[in-house]
Image: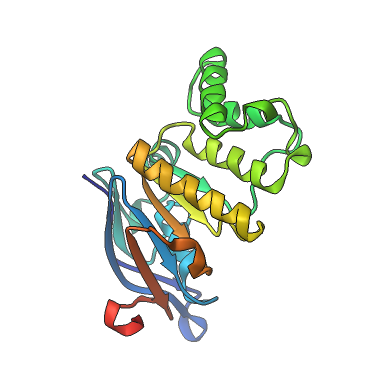
Amino acid sequence: MTVLRVNHLKHVFGSGELAVTALEEIDFAVEAGELMALLGPSGSGKSTLLLCISLILAPTAGSIEIGGHTVYAEGWAHRESRRLRREKIGFIFQGHNLIPFLSARDNIVLALELNGVGRRSARQRADELLDYLEVTHRADALPGNLSGGEQQRVAIGRALANEPPLILADEPTASLDTERGGRVMELLKRIARERNSAVITVTHDERMIAGFDTVRRLRDGRLLVAEEYT
């Protein structure tokens, strides 16, 4: 099953003489259970592409299809786009972006409640995720009292809360040492295998992508074909 399809995507910042093309003619698809790495140097367009896929940034042209729902550039302000982002996409930030005054459990509970889940069911779901991510013992801890690896695991739990078919991770190991970063990447692989989620991870560290199903590279806003980077 195709979870994500990107068609002829283009994004331009600015206009006229100040216009800068960040993405040009991006085409690819990701299947359920597929683990994809997106690589490229700074300024290549990786973060811009991830923001477009997550329906946060409107593309200048092209379309994105998520779970059979097609979103065109002119439809971004529509309520449907916000609903798709909430229900179909889980986003893992470079920094954990946890709410500092909420416990690990309540950071996940909040994501569920915002999607209409009742408090009791949300707490049960949060506890299940904390157990799955092996941080049950830190459920009541505030983010500031968690280690970097624990913070990222809770952030992953928040991204998984509403069981989205698509998980997007923006440099999820950037603030971690090699050992902890490797554990996070192994966890993302496990999520793709066990939960049949499509996982797209932006990273600059090629050591972290062993075992990924697909590797795509961006340069100057364009996806390279294999012959261009092998």
| Residue 198 point in image, percent of width and height | 35, 47
Q: Nearer the viewer, residue 173 or 24?
A: 173
Q: Residue furthest front?
A: 179
Which residue: 28% across, 43% down?
Answer: 67
Q: Quadrant of residue 209?
A: bottom left
**Image-based side of 105 in relation to 40, left or right:** right
Residue 44 vertical position relative to residue 50 in the rendered view, above or below: below
Examine the rendering and report whether any part of residue 7 can be seen: no
Q: Place residue 143 in its image quadrant.
A: top right
Q: Residue at x 51, y 15 (%)?
A: 121
Note whether 53 is above or below 203 in the view shown. Answer: above
Position of residue 36 measured from the top left corner of the image (x, y, whole percent): 37, 58
Q: Is residue 110 above or below residue 226?
A: above
Residue sticking out furthest to the top: 120
Instruction: Pick whichever, 197 or 87, lies toward us.
Output: 197
Quarter containing the C terminus: bottom left
Q: Nearer the viewer, residue 89 or 70?
A: 89
25, 206: nearer the viewer: 206
User: On the rendered structure, is 67 left or right of 19?
Assistant: left
Q: Position of residue 190 (x, y in %)?
A: 42, 43
Count of numbered labels shown in the rendering:
0
Residue 208 image position (x, y, % from top left): 50, 62
Residue at screen point 51% across, 23% down: 128
**Position of the N terminus by quadrant:** top left
| View extreme (left): residue | 1
Query: Is there any visible trace of residue 75 in the rendered image?
Result: yes
Way the structure is coloured? rainbow
